[in-house]
Image (cartoon, rainbow, N blue to C red):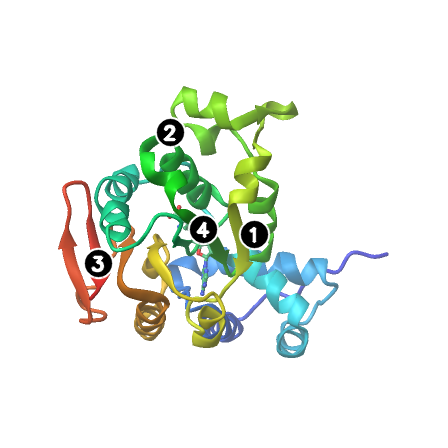
Amino acid sequence: MTEVRPHPLSGDELERLSELLQHWTGMTFGEKRGYYLERRLRERMRRSGSADPCAYFTRLLADAAERQALINAVTINETYFYREDHQLAALSKDILPEIASRRRPGDRIRIWSLPCSTGEEGYSIALWLLDNWPMVDAYHVEIVGSDIDTDALAAAREGRYGQRALARLPDAARQAYFEPEHNHEFRIIEDLRQSVTFTQINLIDSRSVGTAGKFDVIFCRNLLIYFDEPARTAAAANLFDALDPGGYLCLGHSESMARIDPRFTFVRLDDAIVYRRD
Ligand SMILES: C[S@@+](CC[C@H](N)C(=O)[O-])C[C@H]1O[C@@H](n2cnc3c(N)ncnc32)[C@H](O)[C@@H]1O
């Protein structure tokens, strides 16, 4: 088969693509990321055998699989174990004991890692609770990881990680909860893989978010920074609706709900600033 060489994209075409992606995902691709976007787009066009940008855009509207493949190609999946672990400390020291004080032993406590990317955040929550929250076995703790990117979710379910992803993890945790594999990779043990459920959710789509049910704690870190204003507002409303009253929201260190949705209560804990749905 002869290799397809996609035609160069005009500024207008790139802008059109950027608008489509923004509409589907909430992520903005300003001028600074034009080159990044163009490279990913041309790669997708080449792989899907499309030379003409206009024909490819029409295809994107009709072909859900190609649309998903393009979304997977443009997402930024940067993440690692024990990222911003002061929030994990707040989870085990303040947030869960407070929630547990309103529940009975055996009750369900639901924690959501959204976006979870390749799984490091959801598994970090599981590992941290095993090692740092003595009451973990007294409750039915359910951890869900969600992302828009289906390739990232497949990698999360596999649970294989390289040195870079594990660099912040204490050696004892690595030895206890990972099995070494070839290529210097480590696979998180089966029991832990079973402890996190991964599902595809689009945070800016209220119907998609609604399918996940209600949560006591949501970690939504390092996604709002990629969103434009309307997407942030939609995301905030969806996060609010997904929290049970009394539930907590943890954002990334450069993100804030202050100017997005006044319904969240700002809570300053010893280890972290979080938000609560009162
Ligand atoms: C930088 S990662 C953050 C991962 C993790 N929360 C962390 O802080 O380490 C951002 C993730 O957001 C996901 N994403 C982008 N748009 C999304 C959307 N509309 N809904 C859900 N996830 C989305 C991307 O696929 C990517 O995996």
Which of pointers 1 and 3 indicates the residue nearer the eye?
3
Q: Earlier in the sequence, mark 2 or mark 3?
A: 2
The Cα atoms of the two marked residues, 2 and 3, are separated by: 26 Å
The residue pinned by badge 4 equals 142
Q: Which residue is mark 1?
A: 153
Label 1 and label 2: CA atoms lie apart by 22 Å
Ligand 1 image-quadrant field: bottom left
Circles 1 and 2: CB distance less than 8 Å?
A: no
Identify which amino acid the numbered label 1 is placed on: Leu
Q: Are marks 4 and 3 in contact (CB under 8 Å)?
A: no
Residue 40: image location, x then y, percent: 57, 57
Residue identifier under label 3? 275
> Distance between the Cα atoms at labels 4 and 2?
24 Å
Q: Which residue is identified by label 2?
A: 168
Within the image, what quadrant is residue 271 found in?
Answer: top left
Relative placement, left or right, of 126 versus 161 is left
SS assignment at label 2? loop
Pair 2/3: label in front? 3
